[in-house]
Image: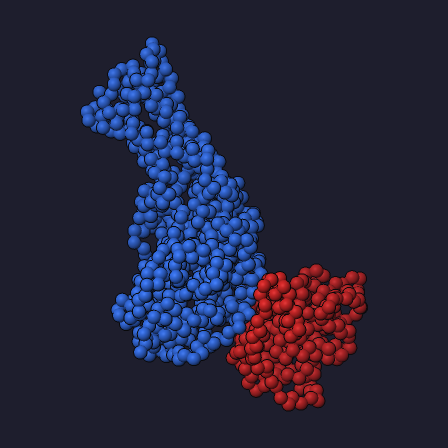
């Protein structure tokens, strides 16, 4: 069994709203860079499959050479190899085309896992486009994966519940976070070993981008509205607070 | 003149029997030595030149803590009883030696005033002291305080104390019989008294003879049994104090990770401690020496708030592995409990209270290092803090503050190489926590008012100390080396810290990684600026209760400077537990990022402070500030907790 996990290096996804600023329509370069939030869930899922079924686990990324030290965390967590396609495009079609190069190089990948969306652009598009390019099944928001006699059983999570799905053959799965795939902390010995591991760098391709033009990028402005809830019965107040938060779609 | 071995034929046989008894005694001690030898060498041999240190021996410690037992007297009655037994037995031992010297070399100890005042009165008095002390200990074993029996009691003391009491009582009976059968002896006030109680009998000399042999053989049996009983502490405790670095705190040192790079070795060394053989010899000596007296348990903030950790339980569990000669079982952490190991706030109150200089926090931290670095096992919130530290170089995950938010509305100079004197090290808490940011702002106001040449780094950094406290030395080393490189580049020599954890890291750990700086905690600098009248705050009648941060008072013995600063602005009141005996706020050891259940340490400490009826609770650590602010919320809606810098800055008249 061969598994590949797509990992993207993104700017800090926890930058406080008040401190967030754009430079050239993208997050300012001053923010710390790290592996995307859901991508780490995907890596953890991949490692668990590797441990359970004895699979080999390749980490595939599209980005720049500076990303390598950050991507080594995926190796320290349990990835077997790291493959970086060099490029700078933000276009989902270009990214998917480049990732396809690395996956074809890996040969016979059974399962491609990716975080459900990147932590910078939050599009959740690339894996779908990639599945189309590879001609294989695509399923989104998967939290659990099992393999039984050549068939895959996966659990797809929704806001209001989950459903179990089965399929055969190759697939691209987008992984959502769940209590089962909380990313592990790599052991120090693994971190030290990961630093020595060779990285396969592949030259990117100039695939045609999608015919979409980015006109404008805006970030939400901070607003604070203060509302006092009556405080006579703590339970009742808690219920009201919960209802208000839902009403305003914070929850 | 008293006749040695009066009424005893072949009395010298008891001295001859002492030879095999001594051999068994020494063989028992050798057994302890052999076990302790199985410990690993220290990772890094300390080469510091310290006063009163000869080779590995700290002479002053062994004299004060080991021989005089100064720490024992912190509990007065226990100390008095222990002193009575210890010094009484020493005098009795000396008397027995002198009697032996009389036998073999005719040293005239049984004549004249020496016999009256030492061999008679002195030895009787010593015997009474020992008996009184033993009576105290026997009663205390029958009606034990909680610390002796929680989580469990060490067996073996009661029979040994009984045996010793029987030896003493038979000794007085022998003396009484001798005096009854001969004549009253000047100075022997107990012997004369006992003689008066013994009825006249023709068989008194026979009874005396039998009892003499019984007494002698019991005494030899006692000596033989010492190494196989808890009484071995008579030997081990002074040795342990002699080898314990007397500087405060656990002294974790740093790890040279290059030794883990060599994969060609037959056996890879463990990071931290997984099995008994991974511990240093000094730690094994600690476990062997521990008497389970529970003084550590009594002062441990985790144990006192019913959390799983008890430092006494840690020692008892490890001593169990040691006595079972189990050096290869790598389940030490599981035997103690992973949760318990992460409960430790590294406050070092246990060390401070220990009468025999045991380093409990170091043993706990070594086990924690293994969990963090080899097993990657961390409690949930700590792991989030760790991840943030690893990714963002600060542990305040989910913070709502940007790195420069605390500077809004004030001018804060950036450190200029060759021009600025002090680096104001803001640290992670005062950068990323909204409440603690006020401390940094207050300190900027103070330094500007006093005309101190200072500047901050253009990009805030963390010392890495939270990683070290969580147990991940590797991440700490990485961060510390990055900081040292930046400091070298900027030519930083003097640092002002707002956080005692940062102060401790810079002074204790950075030098071992090549970073040598003159570091001053902000509370000390403020005191100095006030003393030099560079700051003249207005004094009020407000009462101020100082909570001593563990990393200042206990771990670095900085107790008075913060008080001097506070006395300039108010009236100091003290909590029952203050200075080196301060009770932790609960935030140390990475436990700022923990979810405690049941009684919370910060609430206990806040209550203790509020019970002094103080107007204000002061502290000198951002973590203590945050923990106590949270703890006080249970009892008052008023904002009562402030940092020293905030209190001083608020009383500066800057016209």
Residue at image position (39%, 78%) is: B412
Decide if residue B284 is in sight here: no
Q: Nearer the viewer, residue B532 or A80?
A: B532
Figure quadrant of the N terminus of chain B: top left
As drawn, which residue projects farthest toward the top?
Answer: B202
Q: Nearer the viewer, residue B182 or A81?
A: B182
Q: Based on the displayed image, in which of its 4 quarters is residue B420 positioned?
A: bottom left
Q: What colour scheme has been applied to the protein in the rendered image?
A: by chain
Q: Position of residue B500 (x, y in %)?
A: 40, 63
Q: Based on the displayed image, in which of its 4 quarters is residue B219 positioned?
A: top left
Q: Judge whether B500 appears above or below B164 on screen.
A: below
As drawn, which residue projects farthest toward the left?
Answer: B112
In the figure, the red chain has which letter?
A
Q: Judge whether A160 appears above or below B231 on screen.
A: below
In the figure, the blue chain has which letter?
B
Figure quadrant of the C terminus of chain B: bottom left
Decide if residue A9 is in sight here: yes
Residue at image position (39%, 50%) is: B352
Q: How many marks?
A: 0
Going by the image, does A157 lie left or right of B475? right
Residue at image position (57%, 77%) is: A225
Going by the image, does A18 lie left or right of B506? right
Q: Judge whether A19 appears above or below B579 on screen.
A: below
Q: Position of residue B6 (x, y in %)?
A: 29, 18
Going by the image, does A207 lie left or right of B229? right
Q: Based on the displayed image, in which of its 4 quarters is residue B483 positioned?
A: bottom left
Q: Nearer the viewer, residue B389 or B500?
A: B500
Q: Position of residue A115 (x, y in %)?
A: 67, 72
Q: Judge whether B362 appears above or below B477 on screen.
A: above
Q: Nearer the viewer, residue B29 or B366?
A: B366
Residue at image position (68%, 61%) is: A51
Q: Position of residue A55 (x, y in %)?
A: 70, 64
């Amino acid at each position: 069994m061969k598994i590949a996990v797509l990992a993207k290096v993104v700017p800090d996804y926890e930058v406080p709203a008040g401190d967030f600023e754009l430079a050239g329509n993208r997050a300012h370069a001053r923010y710390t860079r790290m592996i995307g939030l859901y991508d780490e869930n995907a890596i953890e899922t991949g490692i668990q499959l590797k441990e359970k079924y004895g699979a080999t686990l390749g980490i595939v990324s599209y980005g720049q050479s500076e990303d390598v030290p950050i991507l080594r965390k995926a190796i320290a967590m349990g990835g077997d190899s790291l493959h970086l396609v060099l490029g700078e495009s933000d276009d989902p079609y270009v990214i998917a085309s480049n990732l396809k190069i690395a996956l074809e190089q890996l040969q016979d990948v059974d399962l491609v896992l990716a975080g459900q969306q990147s932590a910078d652009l939050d599009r959740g598009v690339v894996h779908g486009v990639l599945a189309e390019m590879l001609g294989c099944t695509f399923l989104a928001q998967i939290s659990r994966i099992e393999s039984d006699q050549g068939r895959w059983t996966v659990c797809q999570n929704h806001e209001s519940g989950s459903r179990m799905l089965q399929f055969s053959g190759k697939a691209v799965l987008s992984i959502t976070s769940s209590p089962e795939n909380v990313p592990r902390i790599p052991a120090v010995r693994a971190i030290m070993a990961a630093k020595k591991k060779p990285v396969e760098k592949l030259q990117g391709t100039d695939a045609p981008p999608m015919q979409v033009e980015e006109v404008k990028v805006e970030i939400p402005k901070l607003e604070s509205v203060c509302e006092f809830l009556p405080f006579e019965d703590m339970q009742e107040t808690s219920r009201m607070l919960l209802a208000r938060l839902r009403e305003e779609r914070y929850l | 003149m008293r006749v040695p071995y009066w009424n005893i034929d072949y009395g010298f046989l008891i001295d001859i029997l002492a030879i095999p008894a001594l051999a068994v005694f020494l063989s028992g001690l050798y057994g302890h030595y052999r076990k302790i030898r199985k410990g690993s060498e220290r990772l890094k041999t300390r080469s510091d030149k310290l006063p009163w240190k000869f080779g590995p021996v700290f002479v002053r410690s062994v004299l004060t803590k080991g021989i005089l037992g100064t720490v024992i007297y912190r509990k007065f009655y226990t100390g008095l009883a222990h002193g009575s037994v210890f010094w009484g037995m020493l005098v009795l031992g000396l008397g027995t030696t002198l009697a032996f010297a009389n036998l073999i070399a005719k040293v005239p100890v049984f004549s004249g005033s020496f016999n009256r005042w030492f061999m008679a009165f002195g030895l009787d008095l010593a015997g009474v002291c020992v008996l009184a002390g033993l009576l105290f200990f026997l009663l205390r074993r029958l009606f034990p305080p909680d610390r002796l029996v929680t989580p469990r009691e060490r067996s073996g003391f009661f029979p040994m104390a009984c045996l010793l009491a029987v030896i003493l009582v038979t000794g007085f009976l022998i003396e009484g019989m001798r005096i009854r059968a001969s004549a009253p002896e000047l100075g022997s006030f107990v012997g004369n008294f006992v003689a008066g109680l013994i009825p006249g009998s023709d068989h008194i000399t026979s009874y005396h003879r039998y009892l003499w042999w019984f007494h002698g053989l019991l005494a030899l049996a006692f000596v033989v049994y010492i190494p196989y009983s808890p009484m071995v502490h008579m030997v081990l405790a002074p040795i342990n104090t002699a080898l314990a670095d007397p500087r405060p705190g656990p002294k974790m040192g740093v790890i040279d990770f290059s030794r883990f790079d060599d994969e060609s070795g037959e056996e890879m060394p463990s990071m931290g401690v997984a099995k008994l053989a991974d511990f240093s010899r000094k730690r094994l000596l600690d476990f062997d020496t521990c008497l389970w007296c529970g003084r550590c348990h009594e002062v441990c903030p985790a144990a006192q708030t019913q959390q799983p950790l008890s430092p006494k339980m840690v020692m008892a569990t490890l001593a169990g592995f040691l006595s079972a000669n189990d050096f290869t079982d790598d389940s030490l952490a599981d035997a103690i409990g992973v949760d318990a190991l992460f409960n430790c706030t590294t406050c070092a109150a246990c060390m401070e209270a220990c009468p025999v200089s045991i380093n409990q926090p170091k043993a706990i931290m070594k086990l924690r290092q293994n969990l963090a670095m080899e097993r990657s096992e961390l409690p949930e919130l700590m792991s989030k803090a760790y991840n943030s530290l690893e990714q963002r170089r600060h542990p305040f995950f989910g913070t709502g503050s940007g790195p420069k938010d605390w500077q809004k509305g004030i001018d804060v100079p950036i450190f200029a190489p060759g021009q600025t004197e002090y680096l104001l090290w803001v640290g992670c808490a005062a950068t990323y926590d909204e409440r603690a940011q006020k401390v940094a702002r207050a300190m900027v106001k103070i330094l500007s008012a006093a005309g101190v040449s200072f500047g901050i780094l253009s990009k805030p950094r963390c010392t890495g100390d939270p990683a070290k406290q969580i147990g991940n030395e590797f991440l700490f080393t990485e961060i510390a080396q990055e900081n040292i490189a930046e400091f070298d580049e900027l030519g930083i020599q003097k640092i002002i810290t707002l956080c005692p954890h940062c102060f401790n890291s810079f002074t204790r750990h950075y030098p071992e990684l090549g970073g040598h700086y003159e570091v001053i905690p902000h509370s000390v600098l403020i005191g100095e600026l006030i003393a030099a009248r560079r700051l003249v705050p207005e004094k009020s009648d407000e009462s101020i209760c100082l909570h001593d941060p563990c990393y200042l008072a206990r771990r670095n013995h900085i107790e008075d400077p913060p008080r001097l600063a506070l006395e300039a602005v108010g009236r100091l009141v003290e909590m029952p537990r203050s200075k080196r005996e301060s009770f932790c706020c609960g935030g140390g050891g990475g436990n700022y990022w923990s979810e405690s259940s049941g009684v919370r340490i910060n609430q206990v400490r806040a209550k203790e402070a509020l019970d002094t009826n103080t107007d204000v609770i002061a502290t000198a650590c951002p973590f203590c500030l945050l923990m106590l602010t949270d703890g006080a919320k249970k009892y008052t809606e008023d904002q009562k907790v402030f940092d020293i810098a905030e209190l001083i800055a608020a009383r500066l008249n800057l016209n």
